[in-house]
Image: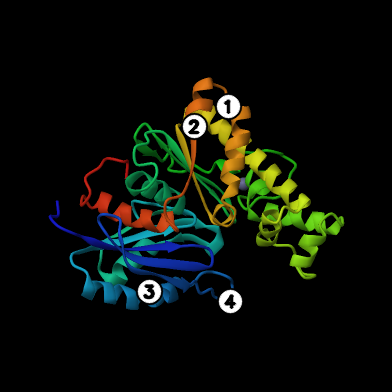
Amino acid sequence: MTVGPAYCIAIDIGGTKMALGVFNNEGQLQGDIQIIPVSFDEHKVADAHQMISAIAPYVEEARQRYSPLIGIGLSICGNINKETGEAVLIPNLHWRGLPFGSMVRNAFQLPVFAGTDVRAAALAERLWGVAREAQFFAWCTVGTGYGGYLFLNGKLYDGYHGFAGPFGHITWDEEGYPCGCGRRGCFETFVAGPAIARAGQAAVDAGHSPLMAELSQGGRVTTQTVIQAYQQNDPAAVSIIEQVARLIAINLSGLVNTLDLEMIVMGGGVIQACPQLIERISHYIRRYLMSDEARRDLRLERETFTNSALYGAAADVFLRSGVINEALGA
Ligand SMILES: [Zn+2]
């Protein structure tokens, strides 16, 4: 057990960029978050060696400024073995079976604690955020993808193989759109950013939204365009966002009816751009909840941090190294 402050480096690796920050064991960011692009080789595989070179100056600076530096926390947008740090399958980076955790450990000679980003985000919300008192909650992200992680009975819930949580891949229409997971018609394909953009494009193509047509200036309609039009009360955009809210409410009510959750913490790019979505989901979800108790008690909250996964990568370091002594299943 460390007396006094301890520090760690947290790195959140997404599909196009990395975020890096130094944290103390109270969850306070030291200085600024650094954003570093992920470099890809000619086969669209993320170049792990270049990524490690790109973070090296920040690791060296942190080593000189902060002591004791307990280790490096890695949060990654895919399936990573939290014991070995092996990137089992990271579709966005085209990594399969890459020993990324040990590469980072060898490069910097610091302990490395790795985990998937949604798990990290749930951990940060439970340790330092809005879910601090919660015993049964779900983290839910709406962005390029849709899904999350579960915290049940006072612990993170990893499941039998460590695959628990991706409720965006519950099938909604078995003959629906292809999904990144290789199957068809997953919930994610109806509610995540690309689905919003697709619905916006369809509205423009059908001539239903002069505003979205104008905002996209002849190019493809993006998720941002639909949200921008929604903020201006464009009827087509309102109908798209209302439909997304209703579908997410159906999906999340299934979790609440099954698991008797007290809270859902919502984050991700779409929620950041359109926080009103939380109120709309909260409105619709009451229709689909089974018990009066759930209708009365269920809370939908916005994420506490601008990047909860980054904070969670830091939380993971302190919990797993024993600097913070709480048994959250970390
Ligand atoms: Zn899927």
Which type of secondary structure does the marked residue at label 4 adopt? loop
User: How many tags in the picture?
Assistant: 4
Q: Is mark 3 within 8 Å of ligand 1?
A: no
Q: Residues within 10 Å of mark 3 (few under 14, many from 20)?
A: some
Give the residue type that dot 2 points to: Leu
Mark earlier in primary sequence (2, 4): 4
Q: From where the camera sits, is residue 251 visible?
A: no
Give the labeled residue for mark 4: 42
Q: Residue furthest left?
A: 3
Q: Is mark 4 within 8 Å of ligand 1?
A: no
The numbered disc on residue 55 is 3
Mark 2 or mark 4, which is nearer to you? 2
Q: CA distance from mark 2 to mark 4?
A: 48 Å
Which type of secondary structure does the marked residue at label 1 adopt? loop
Mark earlier in primary sequence (1, 4): 4
Give the labeled residue for mark 2: 298
Q: Is residue 34 above or below residue 96?
A: below
Mark earlier in primary sequence (3, 4): 4
Label 4 near label 2: C-beta < 8 Å? no
Mark earlier in primary sequence (1, 2): 1
Q: CA distance from mark 3 to mark 4?
A: 21 Å
Residue 282 occupies quadrant: top right
Q: Residues within 10 Å of mark 2 (few under 14, many from 20)?
A: some
Residue 94 occupies quadrant: bottom right
